[in-house]
Amino acid sequence: MPFEENSEYFKGRGAQVNTHNKFLKNKYVNDHIEGLDEEMHENVSTQVFEEHAKSIVSISNSPDLHFNYSINPYQGCEHGCLYCYARNTHEYYGFSAGLDFERKIIVKRNAAELLEKFFNKPGYQPQTIMLSGNTDCYQPIERQLRITRSLLEIFLKYKHPVSIISKNNLIARDMDILTELARLNLVDVTVTINSLNETLRQLMEPRTVTAKSRLMLINKLANENIPVRLMMAPIVPGLNSDEIPTLIKAAADEGIGAAIFTIVRLNGAIAEIFCDWIRKTYPDRADKVLHMIADCHGGTLNDSRWGNRLRGDGKIAESIHQLFKISVSRYLHGRSLPPLDLSHFTPAGGKQTRLF
């Protein structure tokens, strides 16, 4: 049955199920449809939960990440990207990695206050902080809450480098702060686009802005001399892997200085979410796509091996790497992004930190 005719398909949501939280002993089941459990399955509106965080900067020692410090002002994400690796973290809050992840959003209103305290720790030495390493700091609720903007104000106040990654053109709202940071070489922006196919985008990332809007955002950033790169993530063999050259060319034409990518990985509950989704949306090619994904990860959908988990291995992964490398060489030859400047950092006392 095509998904358009499937009454069980939730339009406007990525995940189509609420997977069981492995940390909970009990789980909801719908043995008898009596109208009592409808909210569990209906496309209910987004709920906001407040977290009074005690810290805001996360420290990672993952050897295959290019950053150690990151900030996530939101947990859960309204964008609803069905493949998102951050879904698994929602289980730590007692929620499901499925529908709960995109309709139960946890916010940290005191993020800017905590960041300022972090910068004023005795002996702190600056290094680039990522906004965000997990969920999108410019997801739709940011338009109302402006937590990310308050964080950027602190980065500018302390002249501290920040690297931003998002797929929302809401970034343009903060162009005034970004241009000031860029003037001191304190910011770069990564815009995520993984397909120019609008039908695929609506199914995989139902509440994101269009690829066209994101390309326009790249153009705006580049025209303001804000370093910007393309993140093509995730590449899903059999769904969007053939778009690599076209997408890199389109982004290059708008002014990116670099491009990076990851291959999809289906760890934890995401495997169940993705398998359910693809069998409902692309039943004719579901098995083929799943087999190709497994081929990129040693024969399994769940891959936690450092290095391999993001880049994959095997023949299909190698062909993706080669196509990406050729495309970058063709469309981004001679381009690069400058390293961010750590020397401007000014702690509360006003004495500029000097690095030797």
Image (cartoon, rainbow, N blue to C red):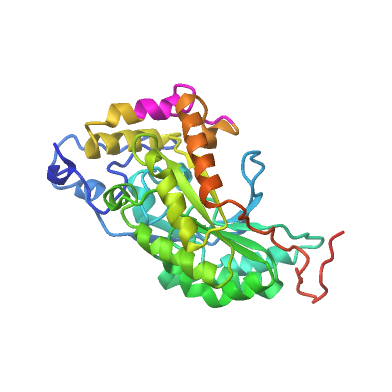
Image location (x, y in percent) of residue 113: 62, 69
Name the residue: 46% across, 42% down: 85
Quadrant in the picture for the N terminus: top left
Residue 158 at x, y = what percent? 70, 72
Image quadrant where residue 47 sits: bottom left
* x 28%, y 39%: residue: 277
Magenta stretch holds residue 9: no
Q: Nearer the viewer, residue 343 or 350?
A: 343
- The residue sitting at 64% across, 40% down in the picture is 62
Q: Position of residue 29 (x, y in %)?
A: 25, 36
Q: Is residue 70 above or below residue 286?
A: below
Left or right of residue 227: residue 3: left
Q: Nearer the viewer, residue 223 or 113?
A: 223
Magenta stretch, main secondary structure, is loop
User: Which residues lie in the magenta part?
Assistant: 290-305
Q: In screen coordinates, is 351 left or right of 36?
A: right
**What x and y, as percent, mark residue 7?**
14, 44
Of 332 and 59, the residue lying toward us: 332
